Amino acid sequence: MFYEYAQNKFIFTPSQIKESLSLMNELDAIKEHSQLKIFLDGSVNVQSSPEGIADEVKAGCGFLIESNDEVLHQFSCSLPIIYDGVKTNSHITEYESLFRCLSYLEKTQKDLGLLTLEIWSDSKNLVRQMNGDARIRNSVIRDFRGKIQNQIKNFRSVTINFLPREENGRANLLAREGRETKK
């Protein structure tokens, strides 16, 4: 036991006090970073040759995670241009960004049940579809939505919000960087 009862007082050894303080500090650190703001974006660029013969398609995604206005992590990468026979579009890249962000948190965080996520995207489609306010016709996006919904169940709370494009510049820059990255 952590204590002994003596003369109506609890007595702790120095090592027990140190262990308790360490645990309290760890819980404070978790609490401090338990509310995360996530900004995400996807990007697709199609370049046609002057003759219109060949298109060069590049796709990328990016996200950043903040807590208390401090950037904890940022990420960007290039994406495939075909998903299950479907050409990549901006909607798919937005979903890929959200999926990768949640996957990152699953791999790096100890207890997802303590995390509250406030997710911001400049994609009205993603926000409306993830919040159940619009239907999904694209099979790739439908698959992503199912995977993301399963991920979301692991967190304490998740809200997905719309952010105008001009206010999502950092995530947009990461997505464009990812798009230009060689695979």
Image (cartoon, helix red, strand yellow):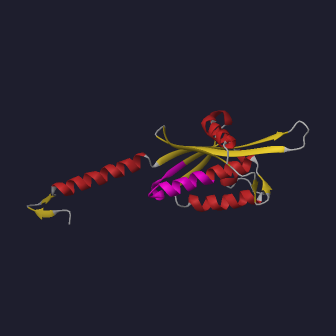
Looking at the image, which residue sits at the far left? 7
Q: Is residue 4 above or below residue 97?
A: below
| Residue 172 picture location, percent across and down | 65, 38
Looking at the image, which residue sits at the far bottom? 1
> Which of 61 and 136 lies nearest the eye of the viewer?
61
Q: Residue at x 34, y 51 (%)?
A: 26
Looking at the image, which residue sits at the far top? 166
| Residue 179 picture location, percent across and down | 69, 43
> Which of 47 and 123 lies nearest the eye of the viewer?
47
In-image side of 134 versus 39 (left or right):
right
Q: Is residue 114 inside the magenta stretch?
A: yes
> Which of 72 and 9 lies nearest the eye of the viewer?
72
Q: Residue at x 89, y 36 (%)?
A: 50
The chief SS type of the magenta part is helix
Q: How many marks?
A: 0
Q: Residue at x 69, y 40 (%)?
A: 180
Q: Residue at x 25, y 55 (%)?
A: 20
| Residue 178 picture location, percent across and down | 65, 43
Looking at the image, which residue sits at the far front? 182
| Residue 110 picture location, percent across and down | 44, 57
In-image side of 123 versus 53 (left or right):
left
Q: Is residue 177 inside the magenta stretch?
A: no
Magenta range: 99-117
Quadrant including the N terminus: bottom left
